[in-house]
Amino acid sequence: TVTAHGLGRRSLVYVFKPLSTSLLLALVASGPSFLSSPYAIAILAGLFFSLVGDVFLMLPADHFRSGLVSFLVAHACYVHAFLHDRPLDVPVAPFAVSFAVGALVLPAFWAGIPSRLRAPVVVYLALLLVMASLAASRAMQLQDVSAVCASAGAALFVLSDSVLAWARFRRPFPAAQVLVHGTYFPAQWLIAVSSFSVWPIA
């Protein structure tokens, strides 16, 4: 998918972008404990809505709002996954850092966001930061490789969406799609593999 964007081959993007996310869906569904794991089921649901969002965003017409809503639901699924097995005493530092960064970054895009999209973008950004913060706090608490993978994937997701927002609402640049997808698919892969067994770090 990244190569297809780099080459500017739209026909290849239409094939490989949904195929890549579909393969991640199959990866999660192939896990040995998938049917008995609420975490894996929530991750699978998140990937499914991500696939829907991928399709909306790659269509020739502008379906950005529909894609945004699809990814909003995907992040809600990831939030559900990251909440289900964490201890009650959540470290607040990841939330403080995430929302401080969000408060600094959003004004840079604000003028370029159409008025009809401003409310959805703010809601999306808030849920994205909650998702990434929960993933980070969960990794701090559980200290296993699975949680660390999820946290790294969530952080890459924030980076990918930041590049997308910069290119769409601030200043387009030629390598934007390569950078967006070069971080997006590793992000989704890390979140997908986190659905397998929990591996202790030490």
Image (cartoon, grey):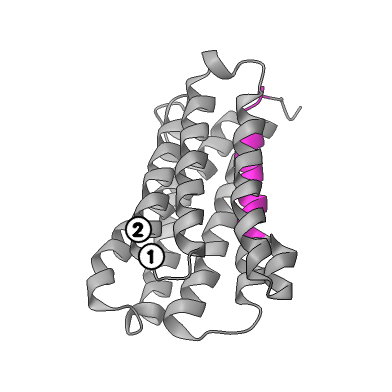
- Say if residue 16 shows up in the picture: yes
Give coordinates of residue 158: x percent, y percent.
52, 59
The answer to which quarter of the image holds residue 76 is top left
Residue visible at 45% across and 84% down?
A: 170
Residue visible at 54% across and 15% down?
A: 35
Residue visible at 24% across and 65% down?
A: 119
Element under disc 1: loop
Give coordinates of residue 6: x percent, y percent.
72, 73
Element under disc 2: helix
**Label drawn at residue 66:** 2
Circle 1 residue = 63
Mark 2 belongs to which amino acid? Ser
> Would residue 193 be counted in the magenta stretch?
yes
Is 118 in front, or is 140? 118
The answer to which quarter of the image holds residue 157 is bottom right
Q: Is residue 123 left or right of residue 198?
A: left
- Say if residue 148 shows up in the picture: no
Give coordinates of residue 130: x percent, y percent.
40, 49
Q: Is residue 109 left or right of residue 58?
A: left
Q: Which residues are magenta?
A: 183-198
> Would residue 107 be counted in the magenta stretch?
no
Residue placed furthest toward the front: 11
Q: Quadrant of the N terminus?
A: bottom right
Mark 1 belongs to which amino acid? His
Does the residue at mark 1 contact the one at mark 2 (Cβ under 8 Å)? yes
Q: Is residue 164 left or right of residue 194?
A: left
